[in-house]
Amino acid sequence: MYLTVTALLLAFISQTIVCHVSFQPEQIHLSYGENNYEIVVTWSTQDATKQSIVEYGIKGMILKAYGNATEFIDGSNKHKQYIHRVSLTNLTPDSKYVYHCGSNLGWSSQFWFKTPPLSDWSPNIAIFGDMGNENAQSLPYLQEETQRGLYDAILHVGDFAYDMSSENGVVGDEFMKQIESVAAYLPYMVCPGNHEERYNFSHYKSRFSMPGGTESLMYSFDMGPIHFIGLSTEVYYFLNYGIKSVVKQYEWLKNDLEIANKPEQRAKRPWIVTFGHRPMYCSDTDGDDCTKHETLVRVGLPLFNFFGLEDLFYNNTVDLCVWAHEHTYERLFPIYNYQVYNGSYNEPYRNPKAPVHIVTGSAGCKENHDDFNKTVPAWSAFRSKDYGYTKLKAYNSTHLHLEQVSVDKLGQIIDDFWIIKDYHKSYPLHIEL
């Protein structure tokens, strides 16, 4: 009798613990909403809860915001979870908020984030691509620097976890837990890469919450003097999903750049920075994508070269193009159509006559490094195979500063350059679109 009661009691306790664990928030991460003073909190639970709540405030968690949850079922063995989203709106500028998320069935730990000032803001951003949950060499550095308050946002330029869909989504779950120590404290802004393609990018679309209502595939946001544009290069490579995605994104980009180039907008946000996964240019040896002269992202779809992005970016005076995909770091001279358009011989990045490109895909993953061609092209200014990530700071309307951190060299800055623009006017050539 005693043994029977004990067994029943242990079974009840075990079931209760499992029940509470299944409602426990995990994988918490932030993103910008429709402006810098709206933050979207996203998290996951194993089972459905009746409410999705964030309690938050500047001096204690005295405010409440409610959102909703969406059931997400993995495309393989139908692993199920619930993705919760809550928007925190009308936040006070230049303030530190504390928050936690969940429901009456389970709450997360307490986290914090900061809002920017209303004006004279020089944002600091960490940028990288191709980081997995194995061999994530850069993550400890990013965790430590985030906790020190060195960044205002993160740009992860495609390829997450390797892959988020692997093992019925368990690899994606573990990756999102790993980055929580960064992504729960500042906006973690993303774009898709080729490793997100499985099940029509369902893990990427479901797990992230970028602004704009486009399933996080293409969107823009502002930080200080920068207008950022995130895009999907993958629409050019997975045409099995149809050409409609290429056309839709291209037209969206044209419209966004047209608005960004209106005089009143360019005066407020003089810097235009794009980020997408697969580069237009690189000098790697893997024989893929950017190693080919007629890169699809650069010139457009085969045969008729429709919807290429290089001409569009050039005509709209994009200042900086950020890419990943290659597991290396490479800085290019200002370039258009394989021709270098330096500002001058001694100061190539002062008033450059074409966009500047960087490739920063060496954050660390299980696929390790890529190799470079032995011959360095005339348009390649600096390259490194070290694991690492990029730091960007917009000082003002004229000065943009970039540094490359080497993890192999224990955090040493191995590349450091400024893009200086005394004016933001059109590049000298005019390309008919």
Image: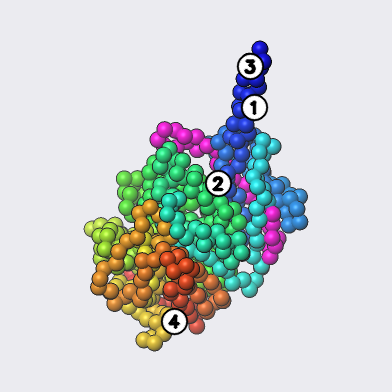
For residue 351, the mark is 4
The residue under label 2 is: 27
Residue 188: which quarter of the image? bottom right
Coordinates of residue 388 in the picture (x, y in percent): 44, 64
Coordinates of residue 234 in the picture (x, y in percent): 37, 53
C-alpha gap between disc 1 and disc 4? 68 Å
The residue under label 1 is: 13
Residue at horizontal 66 percent and vertical 68 percent from the top: 118
Badge 2 marks a residue whose secondary structure is: strand
Foreground mark, 2 or 4? 2
C-alpha gap between disc 2 and disc 3? 40 Å
Residue 315 in view, yes or no? no
Foreground mark, 2 or 1? 1
Q: Amino acid at mark 1?
A: Ile
Depth check, front residue: 427 or 344: 344
Tags 3 and 4 in contact by the CB under 8 Å rule? Answer: no
Dot 3 or dot 4, earlier in sequence: 3
Residue at horizontal 58 percent and vertical 34 percent from the top: 22
Residue 53: which quarter of the image? top right
Residue 90 lies in the magenta stretch: yes
C-alpha gap between disc 3 and disc 4? 82 Å
Coordinates of residue 207 in the picture (x, y in percent): 50, 46
Dot 2 or dot 1, earlier in sequence: 1
Instruction: Please give left or right for residue 102 compared with residue 316 in the image.
Output: right
C-alpha gap between disc 2 and disc 1? 26 Å
Residue at horizontal 43 percent and vertical 38 percent from the top: 168
Foreground mark, 2 or 3? 3
Foreground mark, 1 or 4? 1
Dot 2 or dot 4, earlier in sequence: 2
> Callout 1 environment at 10 Å: few (<14), some (14 to 19), or many (20+)?
few
Magenta part of the chain:
72-98
Residue 44: which quarter of the image? top right
